[in-house]
Amino acid sequence: MSEESRTAVVIPAAGRGVRLGPGAPKALRALNGTPMLIHAVRAMAASRAVSLVVVVAPPEGAAEVKTLLADHALPDRTDFLVVPGGETRQESVKLGLDALPEGIGVVLVHDAARPLVPVDTVDGVIEAVREGAPAVVPALPLADTVKQVEPAGPDKPGAPEPVVATPERARLRAVQTPQGFDRDTLVRAHATVTDNVTDDASMVEQLGVQVVVVPGHEEAFKVTRPLDLVLAEAVLARRRANDGF
Ligand SMILES: Nc1ccn([C@@H]2O[C@H](COP(=O)(O)OP(=O)(O)OP(=O)(O)O)[C@@H](O)[C@H]2O)c(=O)n1
Ligand SMILES: C[C@](O)(CO)[C@H](O)COP(=O)(O)O
């Protein structure tokens, strides 16, 4: 592996988890007794291609996150850094990018809120970037039909919303993380794009750079609402049962 193709992962973990309900910051909440963040860090460090993981911690929680990383078994081949996060996911990712050392050529951005992504998905994204794609996102086809609506607005919750269009489902994909990038492309996107967007790949799209999709995985789902915790614990239980055979 050339020095320039060394791969780092930035894990934005500074969100509050409002949609999950009251409690600790989402990344620090437990899944089967282990913080979600530790599951996510292990999922990234499971890839032999990953040499550095930068965790972007809740702003007041960097010391706690450093202690968590020290207290849990993690692969020796991977280095870890912790930096405090920002007000938005975008700001947090930028703070993680700013902490990257020289010699990293490929950067993955992975939500702490997707703790169960399998290593094959991580490796698939890294491989596509190393083969020359500047921006790669894992994604799945949709199970539901999607409608574009005229949103009712926050002051009218539950009000009927007029449908504007029904995009052709076969052309849509639900995008996951880790999203992988050539480092210079992602740094340029974060230096250029000022709109608040919901993923890093759309910032790269705004530069006019081609983003490509590779297969995602059902277990890379994002823990967003309380029911997702139930699903995550069921996935962990199934993995444990399968390991037992
Ligand atoms: N200021 C922020 C906001 C979000 N994130 C991270 O971005 C990822 C995706 O965000 P999301 O699932 O929306 O997490 P929260 O912002 O915590 O959720 P909510 O919107 O329900 O508060 C999470 O790993 C979250 O920790 C972050 O690092 N910094
Ligand atoms: C980056 C992401 O996970 C891709 O699906 C998603 O856009 C994050 O959205 P969130 O609202 O910040 O959870």
Image (spheres, rainbow, N blue to C red):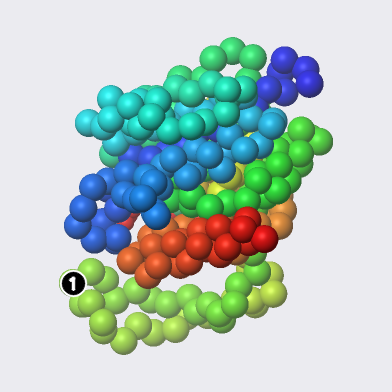
Image quadrant for the C terminus? bottom right
Any part of residue 207 in sight: no
**Neighbour tally class for label 1: few under 14, some 14-19, many 20 plus, Cα within 10 Å:** few
Q: Residue at x 37, y 70 (%)?
A: 227
Extreme-top residue of the structure: 102
Dividing the image into 4 quarters, which one contains the N terminus?
top right
Q: Specify whether 229 is left or right of 178.
A: left
100 or 75, nearer to the observer = 75
Question: Where is residue 58 shown, x and y percent of the image?
Answer: 29, 36
Q: Quadrant of residue 156?
A: bottom left
Residue indicated by mark 1: 155
Q: Is residue 38 left or right of residue 16?
A: right
Please tell me in which quadrant of the rendered image residue 88 appears: top left
Q: Quadrant of residue 4?
A: top right
Within 8 Å: ligand 1 and the Cβ of disc 1? no
Labels in figure, total: 1
| Front in this rendered view, residue 185 or 138 | 138
Task: Return the x and y of residue 191 as percentages of the image width and height.
Answer: 48, 28
Residue sitting at the far right: 131
| Residue 18 appears in the rendering | yes
Q: Residue drawn 53% across and 39% down?
A: 42
Q: Residue at x 44, y 62 (%)?
A: 233
Q: Position of residue 197 (x, y in %)?
A: 44, 48
Query: Of residues 237 and 58, which is closer to you in this image?
Result: 237
Question: Residue 238, image x and y in percent?
Answer: 56, 64
Q: Amino acid at mark 1?
A: Asp
Q: Residue at x 43, y 50 (%)?
A: 113
Label 1 residue SS = loop
